Image: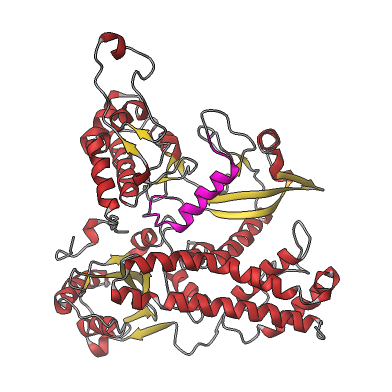
Amino acid sequence: MTHDGPQDIARAILAGFDKHYRLFRAISAGAKERFEAGDWAAVRSANRERIDMYDLRVREGVATLRQFPRVHDESLWPAIKHAYVALLLEHQQPELAETFFNSVASRVLARTYYNNQHIFWRRAVSTEHIESLRPTYNVYYPAELGLRATLKALFIDAQLLCPWEDLERDLHALLHVVSELLPKPREVTQSLQVHVLSSLFYRNRSAYLVGRLDTGTVELPFAVPIRKNSKGELYLDGALAGQEQLGTLFSLARAYFMVDMEVPSGFIAFLKTLFPSKPAAELYIALGLQKQGKTEFYRDLFEHLRHSSDRFVVAPGVKGMVMVVFTLPSFPYVFKVIRDHFEPPKDVDRKKVMEQYLVVKYHDRVGRLADALEYSQVALPTTRLDPSLLAELKQLAPSQLELDADKLVLKHVYIERRMVPLDVWLHGADDAKLKHGLFEFGQAVRELAGANIFPGDLLLKNFGVTRAGRVVFYDYDELAKVTDCTFRKLPTARDDEEDWSGEPWFFVGAHDIFPEELPKFLFNTDKARALFLSMHGDLATAEFWQQKQEQLGRGVEDDVMPYPEARRFPHQHP
């Protein structure tokens, strides 16, 4: 290699990123064709392939840089970064390209963590007003077209190639919903505009048209799910409106969307108008740009540390046997470090726990599995760590710690949205709260089963309650496929000695599960047990699980809707 200057290295890194985003965008844009074909197996395969893309391209980028003899000279990297910034001034994905630079640099330089001279600690290139060949969103004017004609144009312009089952019928139902959102129902003013993102949002077996009604004084977010019937015809399944309903749709407890984005920052800016309080980090992640989401989150965390003074403390609730879990009370996330050793009866190791988190990353989480951000080499100021937390980390996870001057470096950590543990949430609950919590708990188990997931450790402490009141599972070390379990009826005792035995008097295999026993050890009051059985009694039968296994064995997973039944149109299909 004759050229070994900062500009050459910078160009090589950017070429690696451009290849990555070209492939990322191609597989995301291909979601339209997969949806039109109804190829749901290809949908699952593409999701997994896209998750793996980033690390593959980073490894390729690092391998390319080995051709430059001076690339390991740390003093050269400020100049490499400066040259890289110059290359991004007219780039359409500068923030993503900066993050790719960081990923490559962190693997090339032998440093524990980095300062702003070597990487992009903050954004160096603005993402405002980036032009694209196709506008980020399209604008419609109901005062000119009429409201019904405007709504029809939204779906015709989406250019889906499948025939519609009955678009006029669907528009009638949608018109009723949209009219109720207007300041005065059915009043179309000259100032009313409809803004719709230029790409549909694809996930699982649905496509979503995402937009907002701009009345001139307020912006009202909405989303419309498009699905296919058994004949391959399209229909509108319902309508979601408002931040709360769309927030559930964009939950990180669900699979990532496939969206064709030329300028991702434009989509994020639009979505921020729909969810002003939702961090950009979570929006990037929802769109499949997990690494960018991690970058944004990391910046948010340290910006928060600069403007707060509370300390990281051990998270409230019953302590787990696998993780040390801590939180910063003023910051709505928990940090989870794998312990060095697990006490019996836990029969897993660090590798197995990490594999389980990866399984969750790849899987359709059906809104019931918490997504986790995985980090290496996170440096936290020791002055912000409560002494009892520091002592617990040193005692239970010393191999994952490194003290560096005034910083504690966590070698590996998972970060998740903070939830209230279900057992804590239900403590002292009144009848209405108890009923809601137990119904949600049963629904979580049921929906996970339909996605071929058995939580394993079903204790209430391993489930959390989100801000929206949904119950989500977050303890993955004993996660298993429903199809890998053996669900059995509890044998009947033959005599009093067997009936009163404190130990099983019958053979129990490693994968045997007796659903009848679940209510007994899950609930410590007869009231809670009876209420759960009245709503979800079938979950306590071997027949339910055996029937689910038979269904899954035929390759049929439940299609769990990310919105309530009340938001579906009357003509919806099973």
Quadrant where the C terminus is found in the figure: bottom left
Position above or below: 342 against 106: above
Quadrant for residue 224, please give it.
bottom left
In the image, what residue occupies the spot 42% across and 66% down? 45
Position above or below: 118 against 161: above
Of residues 416 and 277, the one drawn nearer to the viewer in this rendering: 416
Quadrant where the N terminus is found in the figure: bottom right
In the image, what residue occupies the spot 58% across and 33% down? 342
Of residues 164 and 2, the one drawn nearer to the viewer in this rendering: 2
Q: How far across and down, in percent of the image, does residue 165 sit? A: 16, 76
- Residue 94 visible, this angle: no
Q: How far across and down, in percent of the image, does residue 73 sit? A: 84, 70
In the image, what residue occupies the spot 32% across and 59% down? 562
Q: How far across and down, in percent of the image, does residue 365 sit? A: 40, 54
Q: Is residue 425 left or right of residue 234?
A: right
Which residue is the extreme one toward the top?
497
Colour mode? secondary structure
Quadrant for residue 34, please give it.
bottom left
In the image, what residue occupies the spot 66% across and 54% down? 376
Q: Is residue 279 left or right of residue 221?
A: right
Does the segment drawn in magenta span residue 362?
A: yes
Q: Which residues are magenta?
A: 347-369
Does the segment drawn in magenta span residue 358?
A: yes
Q: How far across and down, in percent of the image, does residue 281 sit? A: 54, 63
- Residue 182 visible, this angle: yes
Q: Is residue 57 left or right of residue 46?
A: right
Number of numbered discs: 0
Of residues 335 and 212, the one drawn nearer to the viewer in this rendering: 335
